[in-house]
Image (cartoon, rainbow, N blue to C red):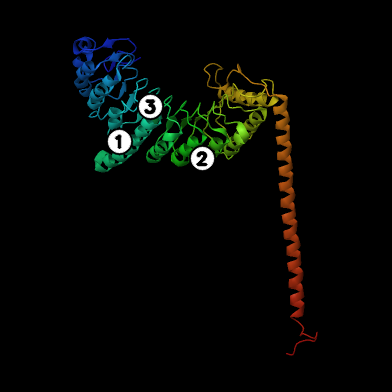
Amino acid sequence: MSDPTTTFSLADRGLKLDTAEETQKHVEPLKASTSHTTISLNGNTFGPPACTHLSPLLSAQASLHTINLADIFTSRLLSEIPPSLSSLLTSLLPLQNLQTIDLSDNAFGLNTQAPLVEFLRKHTPLRVLVLNNNGLGPEAGALIADALSELADKKEEARKDGGGNKIPELETVICGRNRLESGSMKAWARCFTKNKGVKVVKMVQNGIRQQGIEVLLKEGLAGCARLEVLDLQDNTFTHVGAGALAGVLDGWEELRELGVGDSLLGRKGGMRMLCEALRKGKNGKLRVLRLQYDEIDGRGVGMLADVVKKGQLPELRRVELNGNRFSEDDERVEWLRVLLEERREEAGEDEDGGEWGMDEFSDLEEESEDEEEEEREEEEKEKEAKAEEILRDAEEEEGMNVSQKKDEEVDALAEKLGKTDMIGEEPNP
């Protein structure tokens, strides 16, 4: 339960506040106390005069740690948003304890993003940023990413100027449903190269295609060794993104949750690449794996079950696979279910809560006969390739042995010739 002496909330009241007078009667507690640590204004709509009235009240809250400004401009004209946003964010800049800000469900396209960009590039105490459903698009999205890159430089300067441990890393970036697309991924890659201390990244449903995913992973997130949660669901991976993910996974030893569902990851060997990367054992802290609607077949589930069975994912407790291409009765699915159930029982946890086991299979797509035949053919090809590799290794080893034997025979002959002269007589002493 929140402490009423340090928490102020107008959350989801549906208020439409246009003037200072209308606003004043709702914000009296902010006048009465300047010791609030949490303020929630979300779910109301504020006009420019209302925001101007709020501004000095917010700037006086020196202990403020968290503010929720989600969905505060509904029904406002685009021309009203920049001055309103500027009043609010300018008042927050001096607050050195303000680490968490949620600005979701507000329209921050190219026409309205400027005050937000200005705030993000300057507010060094920022630790957690939540921007969901803001309609950014790739251009405004790139501007936000560049602002966060600049923020990283500002944080470093502040630490050198005596801020020390008081200046936190940017640890959480949540930017979903914003049409970031592949066009902004270079900027986001630079952002994460600068902000290497990030722990949580959620960029779901952004229309990022496989080439953009590859850039984001290889050029940006690959260097974020402290990453604990990565959620890129409902973008497009295919085998290109799957290969990029497989190539960087071993650098995330702190990873606890990976969400790559609804991304076509299972196509053209994508699941095989993912499982081979997990088989290296570098992601031993991984607990949750979200792989829904990825066109994964029974063979892919079997690969994952094998990784779990052999102990490379000792902490894995939850796997989400609904919407894929296999039968619920597939024995490989049952193997994985049993393995996760055994872990839950060993941990002494209840079944409720959705933190363990597998999700409900309400929307599976059974493999067609053609797909099953294709699966069998691929398995045969893999067996043949493995057999050829074993045979090749054996031939190379035999060749080395023959070569070694020939070398020994030559050495023996040279030693014998060394004891006689060219016509077979013993050499003169």
- Identify the residue under disc 3: 136
Kind of residue at disc 3: Leu
- In this view of the protein, which residue sits in the foreground, 215 or 278? 215
- Marks 1 and 2, the one that precedes in the sequence: 1
The residue type indicated by label 1 comes to: Ile
Residue 427 at what x, y percent from top left? 75, 87
Name the amino acid type tagged 2.
Val
At 35% from the left edge and 36% from the top edge, which residue is drawn? 146
Q: Is residue 192 above or below residue 317?
A: below
**Residue holding disc 2:** 248
From the image, state whether disc 3 or disc 1 is nearer to you.
3
In whole angstroms, how far apart are the C-alphas of marks 1 and 2? Answer: 28 Å
At which x and y percent is residue 81? 28, 21
Disc 2 or 3, which lies upstream in sequence?
3
SS class, disc 1: loop
Q: Which mark is residue 167?
A: 1
